[in-house]
Amino acid sequence: MLKNRIIPCLDVKNGRVVKGINFVDLKDAGDPVEQAKIYSDGGADEICFLDITASNENRDTIYDVVDKTSKKCFVPLTVGGGVRSVEDINKLLNCGADKVSINTAAVQNSKVVEDSSRKFGSQCIVVAIDAKRKDGGWEIFTHGGRNSTGINALEFASKMEKCGAGELLVTSMDKDGTQSGYDIELMQKISSGVNIPVIASGGVGTLDHLVEGIKSGASAVLAASIFHYGTYSVNEAKQYLASKDIPVRI
Amino acid sequence: MNVTIVDYNSGNISSVINSFKEVAKKNVNIEVTSDLNKIKSSDKVVLPGQGSFKSCVDALNNIKGLVYTLNEFAISNKKPLLGICVGLQMFADVGYEETETKGLGWISGKVSKIDNQNGKYKLPHIGWNQINILKNSKIFKDIENNSHMYFVHSYELIPNDKRVVSATTDYSSNIVCSVEKENIFGTQFHPEKSDKTGLKIIDNFINL
């Protein structure tokens, strides 16, 4: 039976982890490679890096991070943030990323999704959708949630599936950072509207939130803070899901 | 010993390279190349593959003499070859992704889209699934039955002779996820992304 995935996400800025796991025995708390290794050794089903480097000059730091991580971690590695073109995707894959997530570029030019999924295969193309509630529906935002688009999230999700996306990483901007749980209705609507896997993101504060995320129809749950701050380990999260009869890899 | 990973522009192979280099011991040289002479003289060959069946077959055919060399290596000389993901799928006679495309014909059968039972099962089949080991394949030495492996695919190999099947996985139906036919091995899952258990399979192949 296919297991539900737990994906810890690390925010990386200028090659350093911003919100890090607060472990005393870490040699270098800002080293993304070491943190990713802790997650993969702890049973993470995948690792996600979100590059939040603001300046273009430092953009290349992520390639070095991906290269080093992929030589140490032998679980799938997804990298997103600032991915603009087929060439950017190519560079990340060559450095050892297994999947690349595309947000703003997918909205501005869906051809990037079409071209890259044809060139590299749908399996490595993840479209990241940042959605916010509006008028009884959801609107998508770009540029890390700063720019509104007027585009309906459910319609956009279907369009991305048609363009060749292999997965959708859906983040609720209303919930992100609140630790009050995923936007379950959003996850349900998108999961049931597409035939590709959905990764739920934004709002996890407790292990029950992970359970709710999976029950909403998502194939995987992504979380940052609860793992970063050591509130729970990945293994604890998996044990808890298993105790609630949710199939996970243990 | 020389193990060659065939680099034929079949998509992202860096994870395959990293995993083989991680596992390789001092006396094992991992080469990544499309050089026909190097492939010929190597002891073992790894055939990765990402993207569609058609794009991988096209990429193989784009390198003049590569299919001939692989045939010579695996069929005439019977040296060990491991196909991963679409690398395994290409063993079949024919694939139906994008359009009907002729495969290598090493394992009689076809590659078809997984039956998603009218949307009940999401495709691609992405994530960790357990393998049901059906026969004592050499690459499964010290691998427990029901081990988890990482999958990402929408198409499945359907071999005519079920005796080549060494493991299946349950997703919509019992999908063939590993084959062994004499010196030819293949995994639908990605051992290079399947953590320690996956690395053990790579180690088993290197040590055949």
Image (cartoon, coloured by chain):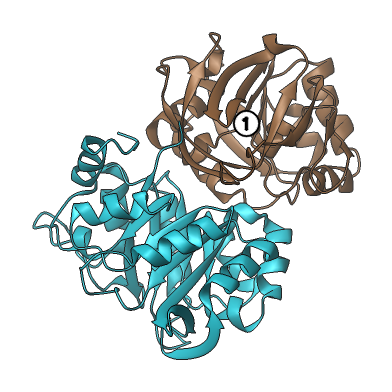
Chain colours: A cyan, B brown
* Label 1 neighbour load within 10 Å: few <14, some 14-19, many 20+: many
For image coordinates 53% across by 47% down, the residue present is B15
Q: Position of residue A205 (x, y in %)?
A: 19, 63
The residue that appears at 82% across and 39% down in the rendered structure is: B96
Q: Nearer the viewer, residue A51 or A60?
A: A51
> How far across and how far down the image is residue A129, in percent?
48, 72
Q: Residue most toward the front? A: A136
Task: State the count of labels.
Answer: 1
Residue B80 picture location, percent across and down? 68, 20
The quarter in which the N terminus of chain B is drawn is top right
Question: Is A55 located above or below residue A64 in the figure?
Answer: below
Residue A82 in the image: above or below residue B17? below
Split into 4 quadrants, where in the image is the C terminus of chain B?
A: top right
Front-lying residue, B88 or A150: A150
For the residue marked with disc 1, what is the amino acid?
A: Val
Residue A159 placement: quadrant: bottom right
Left/right of residue B74 with respect to residue A97 in the rendered view: right
- Residue A173 position (above or below residue B40): below
Provide the residue designation for mark 1.
Answer: B3
Q: Quadrant of residue A75?
A: top left
Instruction: Kindly state the secondary structure of the residue where label 1 is placed.
Output: strand
Residue A82 position within the rendered picture, expressed as x and y whole percent measured from the top left: 49, 78
Read off the chain for label 1: B
Residue extending farthest to the left is: A24
Q: Nearer the viewer, residue B128 or A36?
A: B128
